């Protein structure tokens, strides 16, 4: 997972901080970014979120720590447009209840409405639960290795 507010979102001790509202606002206020936040019906606390951005491999400039330019262009639609997932997180007490799967399913519906047909994501090789979920959702592994640090991650793409 990508770094979120200074913490690795796959870390079980990670909890959104008071600055979380600013993070959400930065996605809402950006024309190509989006976010979906799930809250508890009992406490209104954040129990899960997914943040991403619709990007274009042929037109956008990617950050130095991105590996998008290293991936085979044939993995992406001819238009170059795809969705990059930045963060997917579910609170430890709410995991294994299908929240992450539902967040990704909702993302696919949203992307279809935007005529975006590919999703790119990556996760740490040790995050077996997320890797299994991505496999069940038909994501295809396209790369394994470090991206911006020494942590081994799997890069995955799904065409919808």
Image (tube, helix red, strand yellow):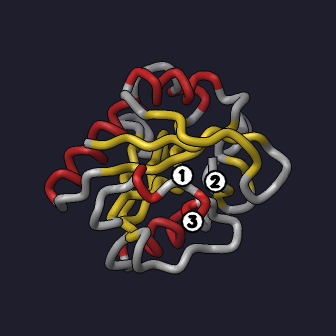
Q: Which mark is residue 87?
A: 1
Q: Which x, y percent locates residue 123?
A: 62, 40
Q: CA distance from mark 3 to mark 1?
A: 20 Å
Which residue does the numbered mark 3 point to in the structure image?
Answer: 69
Q: Which label sits in the foreground, 2 or 3?
A: 3
Q: Is residue 157 left or right of residue 152?
A: left
Secondary structure beneath disc 2?
Answer: loop
Query: Residue at point 63% right, 74% down?
Result: 63
- Can residue 123 be seen in this snapshot? no
Where the C terminus falls, by quadrant?
Answer: top left
Q: How many marks?
A: 3
Q: Which label sits in the foreground, 3 or 1?
A: 3
Q: Residues within 10 Å of mark 3 (few under 14, many from 20)?
A: few
Q: Earlier in the sequence, mark 3 or mark 1?
A: 3
> CB under 8 Å between callouts 2 and 1?
yes
Secondary structure beneath disc 1?
Answer: strand
Q: Earlier in the sequence, mark 2 or mark 3?
A: 2
Q: Which x, y percent locates residue 86?
A: 53, 56
Image quarter for residue 79? bottom left
> Vertically, is 62 above or below 46?
below
Q: Residues within 10 Å of mark 1 (few under 14, many from 20)?
A: many
Q: CA distance from mark 2 to mark 3?
A: 18 Å
> Vertically, is 125 above or below 146?
above
Between 153 and 105, which is closer to the camera in this rendering?
153
Query: Residue at point 36% right, 59% down?
Result: 82
Which residue does the numbered mark 2 point to in the structure image?
Answer: 2
Q: Residues within 10 Å of mark 2 (few under 14, many from 20)?
A: some
Q: Which x, y percent locates residue 9?
A: 65, 46
């Amino acid at each position: 997972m990508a770094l979120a507010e200074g913490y690795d979102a796959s870390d079980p001790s990670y909890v959104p901080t008071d600055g979380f509202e600013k993070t959400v606002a930065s996605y809402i206020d950006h024309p190509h970014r989006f976010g979906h936040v799930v809250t508890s019906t009992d406490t209104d606390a954040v129990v899960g979120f997914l943040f991403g951005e619709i990007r274009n491999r042929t037109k956008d400039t990617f950050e130095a720590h991105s590996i998008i330019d290293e991936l085979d262009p044939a993995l992406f639609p001819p238009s170059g447009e795809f969705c990059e997932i930045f963060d997917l997180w579910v609170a430890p007490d709410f995991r294994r209840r299908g929240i992450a799967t539902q967040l990704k399913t909702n993302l696919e519906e949203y992307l279809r409405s935007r005529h975006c047909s590919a999703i790119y994501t990556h996760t740490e090789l040790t995050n077996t639960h997320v890797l299994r979920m991505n496999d069940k959702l038909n994501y295809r592994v396209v790369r394994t290795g470090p991206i911006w640090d020494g942590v081994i991650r799997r890069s995955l793409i799904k065409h919808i």
